[in-house]
Amino acid sequence: MKEIKVTVQNPNGLHLRVASEVVKICKKRNAKINLTCDNCPHADGCSVISLLMLGAARGTPVTIQAEGEEEKQVLEDLKQLFSDGTGIEEVTNMISKRMCRQNR
């Protein structure tokens, strides 16, 4: 079993879109993944509902544990997702493009 610690970067916390991305990553790898934060139960990385129940706001430290054949790879993928701000730049770019189109 391997473990990493990450921090929720997204201003809206670990919301539905972010949880969905976590589940996509977890389901494509052969490993059992659990996420935990202080004073909360563990969440199954393959369950959107379980992840949302963490209620992890921006700045919340999260521990991710993985066990299985691809534990190293899944932890690397999840670390990258959380370090990228879990989609902040994508949403900002999408909103900017929409605003540009509306102002034409």
Image: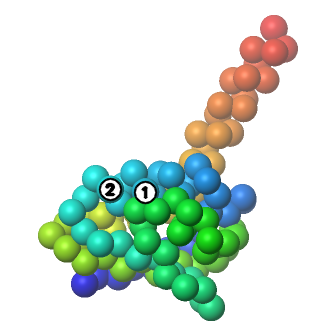
- Residue 74 appears in which quarter of the rendering? bottom left
Mark 1 and mark 2 in contact (Cβ < 8 Å)? yes
Count of numbered labels shown in the rendering? 2
Q: Quadrant of the N terminus?
A: bottom left
Q: Secondary structure at mark 2?
A: helix
Local packing at callout 2 (Cα closer than 10 Å; few below 14, some 14-19, many 20+) is some
Mark linked to residue 98: none
Q: CA distance from mark 2 to mark 1?
A: 6 Å
Asked if one can make out residue 25 in the rendered structure from this viewpoint, the answer is yes
Q: Is residue 50 left or right of residue 73?
A: right
Determine crowd level at label 1: few under 14, some 14-19, many 20+ residues with C-alpha closer than 10 A: some
Residue at 61% x, 53% y: name it.
Answer: 16
The residue to which callout 1 is attached is 23
Locate residue 104 relative to residue 20 in the image: left or right.
right
Q: Position of residue 6 (x, y in %)?
A: 50, 74
Tell me which amino acid carries mark 2. Lys
- Residue 56 in picture, x, y percent from top left: 65, 72
Say which residue label 2 marks. Answer: 27
The picture places residue 82, in percent across and down from the top left corner, at 50, 62
